Amino acid sequence: MSNPGTGTGPGDLSAFIAGLPKAELHVHHVGSASPRIVAELAARHPNPAVPTDPDALAEYFTFRDFAHFIEVYLSVVDLVRDAEDVRLLTYEVARDMARQNIRYAELTVTPYSSTQRGIPEAAFMEAIEDARRAAEAELGVVLRWCFDIPGEAGLEAAEETTRLACELRPEGLVSFGLGGPEVGVPRPQFKPYFDRAIAEGLHSVPHAGETTGPQTIWDALTSLRAERIGHGTSAPRDPKLLEHLAEHRIPLEVCPTSNLATRAVASLDDHPVTEMVKAGVLVTINSDDPPMFGTDLCTEYEIAARLLGLDAAGVAALAKNAVTASFAPDAVKASLLAEIDAHLASWSA
């Protein structure tokens, strides 16, 4: 993957990344709301805690630690009050993706957070599906859903998320996840819910090892039958775990700036992505909650390219990892892989 020394300068590589067709596998629905959309929602549903000035949101989105991030995140969740808000948010997220040449994304949606706030479940499903169809037809962005359990809300949320996923399953739903804080939220307790979702044909993609150690990742693999791991930041602390991930081709959804913003890593230069790649693990690059972290997917690729010493060919290979690790239909995968090859060939020429 790494081919340094071909003469591609930082400016040139940024331009290559901007034009590169991309897939994203770890990005949150509400967490992708741009400052403009958050400000609009805050004006429609005033919350004294949330600024209505887009410029003031940058300071609001400065996190002391992971617990503070969850607190701020939930304050934004509280602004999504009706199906119209859901549809607006979803479509605008896709619009921002289109600007970055993201062709395919698996958006992590937390339906429990909306249904418990009074949005009728059928209306919620209709809103995300309507936005999904419009995004593909009008913007060329193929969206799929991961329904995730908000871990901080406990087993009641797990039961409800499982019911919504299995009984009301929208057409775009492909996977089942677990988000929120890891400390004090052990993965094994969610096994029955993941078992039900997997039995219904959904893929298992829990967060694990972001703010806790490697054992959380092992628990996700053994108890939740994880097919991909959200973050997995602590994996390099356990060489046997890295070896297992590499041998079984279990991808990690790596989000560098997110890990810095939530204090999961001390600095970007300390990020363990280099150790992951050296161990042969299939790494994908993602933005997590991009506006909240002041980033986007293009920026995350630039960071990864710097940390891993990649040229354009190396970045293209990294982009292919996300396509390979995705749950996209085969035709979408083939088309996107061909687009990446064409972009690299055109650039090299």
Image (cartoon, rainbow, N blue to C red):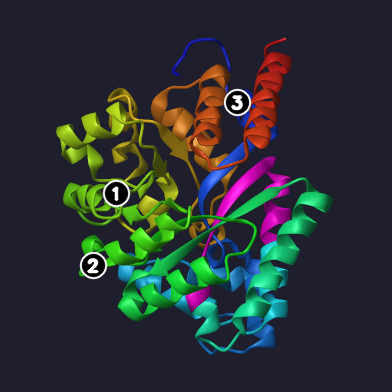
Residue 13 - label: 3
Tag nearer the camera, 2 or 3 = 2
Residue 105: say if magenta. yes
Residue located at (53% from left, 87% from top): 117
Q: Where does residue 83 sit, x and y in percent of width and height?
A: 69, 79
Residue located at (28% from left, 34% from top): 245
The quadrant of the picture occupied by the C terminus is: top right
Residue 189 - label: 2
In space, the residues marked 2 and 3 are separated at their CA atoms by 44 Å
Query: From the viewer's perspective, is residue 122 above or below residue 184?
Result: below
* Amino acid identity at mark 1: Val
Identify which residue, 196 or 139, lies in the foreground. 196
Q: Which residues are magenta?
A: 92-112
User: Does the rendering let one see residue 73?
Assistant: no
Query: Which quadrant of the view contains residue 129?
Result: bottom right
* Amino acid identity at mark 3: Leu
In space, the residues marked 1 and 2 are separated at their CA atoms by 27 Å
Give the side of residue 180 with respect to residue 222, left or right. Answer: right
Q: Where does residue 218 sit, x and y in percent of width and height?
A: 21, 47
User: Does the rendering let one see residue 107?
Assistant: yes
In space, the residues marked 1 and 3 are separated at their CA atoms by 25 Å
Residue 56: say if magenta. no
Residue located at (71% from left, 20% from top): 342
Identify which residue, 76 or 247, lies in the foreground. 247
Q: Residues within 10 Å of mark 2 (few under 14, many from 20)?
A: some
Query: From the viewer's perspective, is residue 204 above or below residue 338?
Result: below
Give the side of residue 74 with respect to residue 340, left or right. Answer: left
Q: Where does residue 77 sit, x and y in percent of width and height?
A: 53, 77
Query: Reading the chain from its start, which is encountered first: label 1 or label 2?
Result: 2
Residue 265 - label: 1
* Amino acid identity at mark 2: Gln
Query: Reading the chain from its start, which is encountered first: label 2 or label 3?
Result: 3
